[in-house]
Image: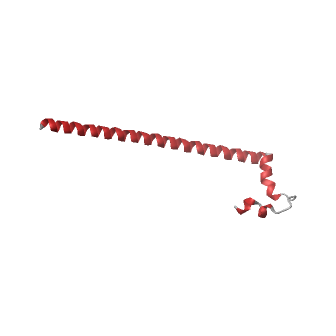
Amino acid sequence: MVKLLHLLYSKQQQQLQATQERQRREEEDLRRLLNFFSQQNAEAGKEEEETLTIFLALGYLGAPGYCSIQTYLTQSNIPCNPMLDSAWASL
Protein backbone atom coordinates (compact mmCIF):
# COMPACT_ATOMS: atom_id res chain seq x y z
CA MET A 1 0.00 0.00 0.00
CA VAL A 2 2.79 2.42 0.90
CA LYS A 3 4.63 1.43 -2.26
CA LEU A 4 1.52 2.14 -4.34
CA LEU A 5 1.07 5.55 -2.68
CA HIS A 6 4.72 6.34 -3.28
CA LEU A 7 4.36 5.31 -6.95
CA LEU A 8 1.24 7.47 -7.37
CA TYR A 9 2.95 10.38 -5.63
CA SER A 10 6.04 10.15 -7.85
CA LYS A 11 3.85 9.91 -10.97
CA GLN A 12 1.92 12.98 -9.87
CA GLN A 13 5.19 14.83 -9.22
CA GLN A 14 6.42 13.95 -12.72
CA GLN A 15 3.19 15.25 -14.24
CA LEU A 16 3.46 18.43 -12.20
CA GLN A 17 7.07 18.95 -13.31
CA ALA A 18 6.11 18.31 -16.94
CA THR A 19 3.25 20.82 -16.66
CA GLN A 20 5.50 23.42 -15.05
CA GLU A 21 8.14 22.90 -17.76
CA ARG A 22 5.53 23.27 -20.50
CA GLN A 23 4.19 26.47 -18.90
CA ARG A 24 7.72 27.84 -18.56
CA ARG A 25 8.40 27.14 -22.26
CA GLU A 26 5.09 28.75 -23.27
CA GLU A 27 5.86 31.85 -21.21
CA GLU A 28 9.32 32.04 -22.77
CA ASP A 29 7.84 31.71 -26.26
CA LEU A 30 5.30 34.45 -25.51
CA ARG A 31 8.06 36.69 -24.17
CA ARG A 32 10.10 36.14 -27.34
CA LEU A 33 7.06 36.85 -29.51
CA LEU A 34 6.29 40.05 -27.61
CA ASN A 35 9.93 41.11 -27.97
CA PHE A 36 9.79 40.43 -31.71
CA PHE A 37 6.60 42.46 -32.19
CA SER A 38 7.90 45.38 -30.16
CA GLN A 39 11.11 45.42 -32.24
CA GLN A 40 9.08 45.25 -35.47
CA ASN A 41 6.89 48.11 -34.27
CA ALA A 42 9.91 50.23 -33.36
CA GLU A 43 11.54 49.54 -36.74
CA ALA A 44 8.31 50.34 -38.61
CA GLY A 45 7.92 53.60 -36.71
CA LYS A 46 11.52 54.55 -37.46
CA GLU A 47 11.07 53.67 -41.15
CA GLU A 48 7.87 55.75 -41.41
CA GLU A 49 9.59 58.68 -39.74
CA GLU A 50 12.56 58.44 -42.15
CA THR A 51 10.20 58.25 -45.15
CA LEU A 52 8.26 61.29 -44.00
CA THR A 53 11.48 63.20 -43.34
CA ILE A 54 12.78 62.44 -46.83
CA PHE A 55 9.48 63.42 -48.43
CA LEU A 56 9.35 66.71 -46.53
CA ALA A 57 13.02 67.43 -47.26
CA LEU A 58 12.45 66.88 -50.99
CA GLY A 59 9.46 69.20 -50.90
CA TYR A 60 11.37 71.82 -48.97
CA LEU A 61 14.36 71.65 -51.32
CA GLY A 62 12.10 71.76 -54.39
CA ALA A 63 13.18 68.45 -55.90
CA PRO A 64 11.84 68.04 -59.48
CA GLY A 65 9.87 64.87 -58.69
CA TYR A 66 8.11 66.51 -55.79
CA CYS A 67 7.39 69.68 -57.76
CA SER A 68 5.79 67.70 -60.59
CA ILE A 69 3.59 65.83 -58.12
CA GLN A 70 2.62 69.11 -56.57
CA THR A 71 1.76 70.84 -59.87
CA TYR A 72 0.45 68.00 -62.05
CA LEU A 73 -3.21 68.59 -61.23
CA THR A 74 -2.92 72.35 -61.64
CA GLN A 75 -1.14 72.51 -65.01
CA SER A 76 -3.05 74.65 -67.49
CA ASN A 77 -1.92 72.77 -70.62
CA ILE A 78 -3.85 69.60 -69.75
CA PRO A 79 -6.80 69.22 -72.21
CA CYS A 80 -9.22 67.92 -69.57
CA ASN A 81 -9.89 68.72 -65.95
CA PRO A 82 -7.63 66.28 -64.07
CA MET A 83 -9.37 66.96 -60.79
CA LEU A 84 -12.60 65.53 -62.24
CA ASP A 85 -11.45 63.11 -64.95
CA SER A 86 -8.66 61.40 -63.06
CA ALA A 87 -9.03 57.74 -62.15
CA TRP A 88 -7.73 58.72 -58.73
CA ALA A 89 -10.60 61.17 -58.23
CA SER A 90 -13.12 58.32 -58.12
CA LEU A 91 -11.24 56.64 -55.28
Residue 64: x %, y % from top left: 81, 46
Which residue shows up at 40% across the image and 41% down it? 27
Which residue shows up at 56% across the image and 43% down it? 42
In the rendered image, which quarter contains the C terminus? bottom right
In the rendered image, which quarter contains the N terminus? top left
Outermost residue toward the right in this view: 77
Q: Is residue 52 left or right of residue 37?
A: right
Residue 43: x %, y % from top left: 58, 42
Can the viewer see residue 39? yes
Which residue shows up at 75% across the image and 48% down it? 59
Quarter of the view holding residue 85: bottom right
Can the viewer see residue 62? no
Residue 50: x %, y % from top left: 66, 43
Q: Camera-side residue: 29 or 44?
A: 29
Quarter of the view holding residue 29: top left
Number of numbered discs visible in the structure rendering = 0
Query: Vertical placement of 73 versus 4: above or below?
Result: below
Q: How is the image coloured?
A: secondary structure
Residue 68: x %, y % from top left: 80, 51
Q: Is residue 43 left or right of residue 57?
A: left
Quarter of the view holding residue 13: top left
Which residue shows up at 59% across the image and 45% down it? 45
Q: Camera-side residue: 62 or 11?
A: 11
Outermost residue toward the bottom in this view: 84
Q: Is residue 11 left or right of residue 55?
A: left
